[in-house]
Image (cartoon, coloured by chain):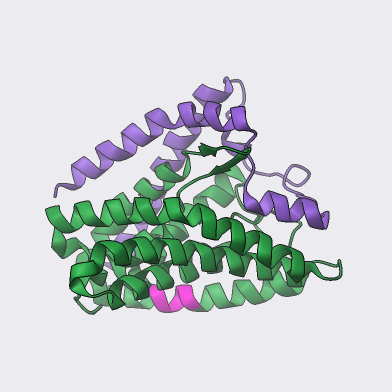
Chain colours: A purple, B green
Amino acid sequence: MKLRKAYLVVALLLAASPLFLVLSDMVGYHEPLDLAAELLGLKDASEEVNWTPFFDYTVPGLPPALGYVVAGAVGTALVVILSKVLQRMVK
Amino acid sequence: MHIPDGFLDPVTAGVTYLVSIAYAVYAFRRLRAEKGRVELVTPLAAGIFAAQMLNWPLPGGTSLHFVGGALSGILLGPWLGFLPMFLVLLVQCLLFHDGGITALGANLLNMAIIDVLIGYAVYKLAPQRYKVFGAFLGGWLGITLAGLACGVEIGVSSQLPYGLAVTVPVMAGWHAALGVVEGAITSAVVSYISRRAPHLVEGGGREAA
């Protein structure tokens, strides 16, 4: 199996991701962890202490769907770069 | 399942960090021994990152996304399988604040260690003719136990009484239900790769180096 094919699948997943963003927003996205936190009254401190450049997969100045794809592409690129650096360290 | 900042007390955060760092140190040391398979880490990490961006809407107002820890364990084994999840969780935390920096140890423990180990072990133990079902079971059980561990971490760190009585049933129950999808995707991917490139499946019978 060619690894190139795997990267093509990654690109397709990223391209499709905004559709899933819209669909999950329609049902009100929340995970089981949100339910447990709500029952216990736990407060997510992420927004108050955020230091990340693309908070919650958004890109400042871009509409949410486009920002989601761009954030995904940036994240994937960083994952690939870090992995390659790691492999070089092993060699 | 990504625990954000503010959910864990310092003791729970510290203990989970220590466990994850110890596992990471050993996994990185094993890298040289598993050199031939290291090149698979990059496409798998990229694939899991992209797959986690697809939030599947479910009736009743819940959504889920594929986690991928069991898949990583089945394809790369218990040590090398840690690395794609480590890279994904690190980037999600530092770039998107998806998972808190104080909870990174716990998130690694749940998704990069427990999910990976369970997925690998269940698949490895499955008889050869039931490997596809083994992948399904590994994916399902991996995510269910990772969810349970997440419930325990939040439950014990909460200042509220009876935290565990709330968090464990909610987290384990929901993830046991949602884990069916995780198991199905894990099984489908492993089945495809097993047919096209069986040598890429670590849990298929070959021992880790």
Q: Position of residue B125 (x, y in %)?
A: 30, 78
B22, B205: nearer the viewer: B205
Q: Quadrant of residue B74?
A: bottom left
Look at 64% across and 52% down and name the residue there.
A32
In the picture, which quadrant includes the N terminus of chain B?
bottom right
Query: Can I make out residue B161 in this image?
Result: yes
Q: In this rendering, would B98 be left or right of B158?
A: left
Look at 86% across and 66% down and name the residue there.
B160
Q: Position of residue B171 (x, y in %)?
A: 63, 60
| Magenta stretch encompasses residue B83 | no
Q: Position of residue A53 (x, y in %)?
A: 61, 38
Prevailing secondary structure of the magenta residues: helix
In the picture, which quadrant includes the C terminus of chain B?
bottom left
For residue A26, above or below residue B36:
above
Look at 22% across and 79% down and name the residue there.
B207
For residue B64, above or below residue A90:
above
Q: Position of residue B27 (x, y in %)?
A: 40, 74
Query: Can I make out residue A84 in this image?
Result: no
Q: In this rendering, would B48 be left or right of B1?
A: left
A2, B145: nearer the viewer: B145
Q: Which residues, given as a range, are shown in magenta?
A: B23-28
Q: In this rendering, would A71 be left or right of A46?
A: left
For residue A21, above or below residue B36:
above
Q: Quadrant of residue B200?
A: bottom left
A86, A8: nearer the viewer: A8
Tell how many labels: 0
